[in-house]
Amino acid sequence: MTESAAEVFDALGKDYEHAFRNLTERRDAITALAERLPAGAQVLDLGSGTGRPTAELLAAAGHAVTGYDVSPKMVEIARAQVPGARFELGDMRELSFADGTWDAITAFFSMLQLPRADQETMIGRISAWLKPGGLLVFATVPADVDGVGIVFMGHPVRASSFAAEALAGKLRAAGLEIVRETRSEFVPEHPGATGEPHVHLTARKPART
């Protein structure tokens, strides 16, 4: 029987942070985002986990970060570790914001347990939530799968994703322009872990003309 995202990440807690602590592509994407943002930018982190490194780095750069996660344990850890950001419990699919609310939105591997249809819906909603000129940083494990059963860090889950080119196409279809892309292979620091492909995409919502 598969586990929900809340169940998985409640159980993993800081083990997840440890396993992915040396993911340099993620840190590079966050740093590049922070440098592009206006001072004191409003940033939404979807699937904020333990708050590290995303919220921590962006808050340290002077930005106002609000993170949402479905795991109560992750929200508890993040609030303790990153007091300079705000963290709330919530499923991203149930969030509602006015169009043009955020300067930037980040989603690092946080949609992998959402069905493809939900991911497409979220990408469209994210595009609407961004201010003109706003930025999305989206990272995932690219694969042509929808609801496939896998074991993630010892937990049975259902995973869904898109191939890298298809994902870029979804972002463009939502009205976003790809401005940065990196692809890499990463082995989490966890017993039995094997290498997994990663893609990090930064996309920009066009400014009003």
Image (cartoon, rainbow, N blue to C red):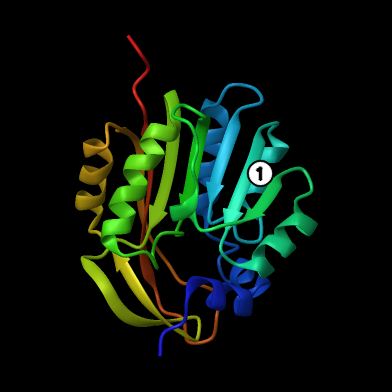
Quick one: quadrant of the C terminus? top left
Which residue is drawn at the image coordinates 47% and 50% (left, top)?
107
- Which is more toward the observer, 88 or 59? 88
- Which is more toward the observer, 31 or 128? 128
Which residue is drawn at the image coordinates 57% and 57% (left, top)?
90
Which residue is drawn at the image coordinates 47% and 76% (left, top)?
4
Number of dots carrying numbers: 1
The reply, left or right, for residue 44 in relation to residue 150 is: right
Crowding near the residue tagged with mark 1, few <14, some 14–19, many ≥20 C-alpha atoms within 10 Å: some
Residue 83, given in percent of the width and then of the height, sits at: 79, 48
Q: Which residue is mark 1?
A: 57
Q: Relative to 192, say whether 8 is above or below.
A: above
Q: Relative to 8, say whether 80 is above or below.
A: above
Q: Residue furthest top?
A: 209
The reply, left or right, for residue 131 in relation to residue 145 is: right
Which residue is drawn at the image coordinates 64% and 47% (left, top)?
55
Which quadrant of the view contains residue 148?
A: bottom left
Q: Relative to 46, say whether 65 is above or below.
A: above
Residue 189, given in percent of the width and then of the height, sits at: 55, 75
Q: Is residue 54 shown to the viewer in this render?
A: no
Q: Relative to 74, say whether 180 is above or below.
A: above
Residue 203, given in percent of the width and then of the height, sits at: 36, 35
